[in-house]
Image (cartoon, rainbow, N blue to C red):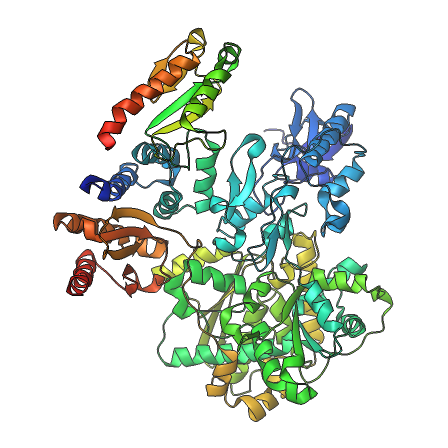
Amino acid sequence: MSAAATIKGSRQFDAACAILDRFGRNPTRLIPILQALQEEYRYLPGELLAYVATALGVPPARVYGVATFYAHFTLAPRGKYVIRLCDGTACHVKNSIPILEALRQRLGLTAERKTTPDLLFTVETVSCLGACGLAPVVVINDQVHGQVTPEHAVALVEEIIAREKPAAA
Amino acid sequence: MQNTVTSKPAVPVLTLNGRSVELGGERNLLELIRKAGIDLPTFCYHSELSVYGACRLCLVEIEGRGIQASCAVTPEAGLKVRTDTADLREIRRTNIELLLASHHQGCTTCGKSAACRLLELARRLGVDTVRFTARRPPAPLDLTSPALVRDPNKCVLCGDCVRFCHEIQGIGAIDFAHRGSAAAVVPAFNRGLGEVECVHCGQCARVCPTGAIMPRSEEEPVWKALQDPGKTVVAQIAPAVRVALGETLGLAPGEDTTGRLSAAMRRLGFAKVYDTAFTADLTVIEEAEEYLRRRAAGFAGPMFTSCCPAWVRYSELAASDLLPRLSSCRSPQQMFGALARDLLPKQLGVAPENLVVVSIMPCTAKKYEAGRAEFAHNGRRDLDAVLTTQELAHMIQGAGVRFSELVPEPLDMPFACTSGAGLLFGASGGVSEAVLRYAAAKLSGGAAPAANYGAADGTAARREVTVTVNEIRLRLGMVYGLREAQEILKEVRAGTCEYDLIEVMACPGGCVGGAGQPVPAGPETTARRACGLRHAAAAAPLHGAQDNPFITKLYQEHLGEPGGPRAHKLLHTKYQTRRRLGKSDGLPLIHGQDVGRVKVSVCLGTSCHLRGSQKVLRGLAKALEERGLAERVELTGAFCHERCDRGPAVTVNGQVFDHCTAELALAQVEAALAVATGA
């Protein structure tokens, strides 16, 4: 394991403390605090939520409630690449489901298991991305891909794997 | 000259179902409608709690405004309100039907069905079919709490428990999570109630309209013991039980049922029925003597009572800094347990292992208290089981005993003789009243007349009483509801609290309002029960604990001096800080990979956090990185080493260091590394 990986948690904790300070440890800023923390950690670990509750003086059950209410927040680790497939009405009628099936098959994922064990990919569906003119739409992190086919989607994934694997090795 | 017309200002009115109704400062339309004699149905409205407006049953039609939830409308003059239109009836029925659709309808086997609000309203509103079926697989029961059982399949999301826990107890152990059809009321991180900061007061169960949260029943083990010819089963009855039990068995709240209770329990097979009020007298003496000893030793500031197990647990979880102020006295329940184990085998001629001791309590937290490790010896608990008032009433019904027809029987001596003061323990202010009666007699050398100080009168959540005896001023604070108690804690910490003794009860109105008592019961019922106890106390021939000849005899023959070594062994206890959330893996900061790496964890719990553990953790992480030691260390931020009074706490390879700084922690880590290298 590299030195950076060894002390990653320490960097993240420093960042988390800075985030709490940036919002003045104000319990009414819980949502922006959670947003910023999720950006740092890529998900919201339970231990981190417990710490946020402690630091803000809010019951842990309340923090858990807020974190589970919004679809934006995730309590399970997510991949470095989050693939959001639109399954809104327009994308659905334009065959979004075969894309989903192709992606899941390629990455060995299911409706319950959304993230690959190597934490490289997360595949999830969203109800509408507001880009119905490009249907069916796939968004990988911040990059939007329109009129996607199953083959196209899998090719995008292969490309990322090819780019990432040498770096990891 | 001006003409002045003096007439009474017209009382503002509104129209309710075509009739004129006067406004009298009601907080919302629902209260006004109920005052006008119409019992609008609700799930989520409780006068003690904030208005939530979720159940959509108290709907009314207001001319010009349409259909609204009356609990959330402020009464205004001139409103034209109807409660009974065809639309309203239809909507209410549909709402109940929808609630039933997602509710586990096992009414015949549900412990709550006799008092279930959902079932009652479904009948009342004429819901005869449920057109929808449940779509979710059943969720497992939460059996982690020693006091309560949570059945998520019966929750109707009214939020009563959430608001009670947050608003009245100031804890927030349960809250809403997820949303839409997945919405649920759960403890933090979907853990069990027994794995979070729940204090087991059970008030969530008291306000729950369905059977989603219920006291955890111990009826079966008690039946088993009662039916075992080899066992001798004895019981103690808490003061608050006798004035509430009758509610389930056809009597009015507040009616003293002691005699019939005793008769009924003998019919169930209890060999002896004793009174917890007897050990309450003992508690008064021990607690008052403890206070006077502390005062003589120069201990400044208030001492807290320790009779309420929910309050004790709260102190251990969240007020560890004030634990030294908590009286070391066991509660009357546990004093009884200790005495029963010590005295009864000989007195009754029973082998110790065949003596079964049961408590009848108004409280769910007492179930938790009886299971605390310090109240067990050689693997046997002092108290084998704790039944709530509800459970005992259910057993009496189950045995077919016609309660109202029973001829009263006395309780069993010697633990039946009790003073009025001991009986008052069941109501808020009662412990204070009892302590004052004892202290007045003691400080005046027995010269003070047997006065009633009125500490147990009144229903406000926070009260106080000041009494001066022989120029010694005693100022006692009384509080119920843990949020209200938290306000006093702030004053104690700030040094502005002038009370000598502070009585804390978790439940509204004290133990009479406990969660083990019959439901439903609002503030009026609780007040009537308290009134019943005050009447029983007033009629008691003995005024204060000091007048109880059996207590005097017990000290002479068995316990020695109040507060002496034997009394201390049997009647006092110790407290410890406890973690709020169950076990956790901690937040990993440095993942060193060396084989002989040193494992370090810094506590990030509330108390250590307030003492600066974050600085310790960051400082330590930075120092380890700078010294190039990261690979040789595994550093985590952990939750609660249960040393909240000595934080920040840092654990290095299993050894805990209190009052730690980053420098001290680093020195310990380096020492551990040196040992590892040396080896």
Which residue: 62% across, 59% down? B514
Query: In the displayed structure, would residue B441 be above or below residue A130?
Result: below
Look at 36% across and 28% down and name the residue there.
A121
Residue B459 located left or right of residue B679: right
What residue lies at 51% left-to-right and 14% top-to-bottom? A92
Give the residue displayed 80% in from the left and 61% down from the top.
B397
Total numbered badges shown on the rendered structure: 0
Farthest residue to the right: give it.
B405
Location of residue A28 (image quadrant): top left
Left-right relation of B339 to B189? right
Residue B96 % position (x, y) = 72, 34
Residue B45 seen by the camera: no
Q: Residue furthest top?
A: A133
Q: Is residue A106 above or below residue B386?
A: above
* Residue B585 in sight from this viewpoint: yes
Assign the C terminus of chain B to one quadrant of the image: bottom left
Asked if B55 appears above or below A60 in the picture, the reply is: above
In the image, taking residue B169 as reference, residue B325 lies left or right, namely left
Which residue is most to the left?
B627
In the displayed structure image, the side of residue B36 where residue A106 appears, left or right: left
Q: Is residue B184 above or below residue B287?
A: above
Give the x, y percent position of residue B577. Answer: 40, 64
Viewer-closest of B541 and B218: B218
User: Could you tell me which quadrant the N terminus of chain B lies in?
Assistant: top right
Name the spot of residue B461 as percent of width and height, x first. Answer: 55, 56
For this rendering, which residue is in front, A115 or B469?
A: A115
- Residue B355 location, x and y as percent? 66, 79
Tell me where residue A84 sits by quadrant. top left
Report the front residue among A121 and B327: A121
Residue B491 image-quadrant placement? bottom left
B626 or B612, nearer to the observer = B626
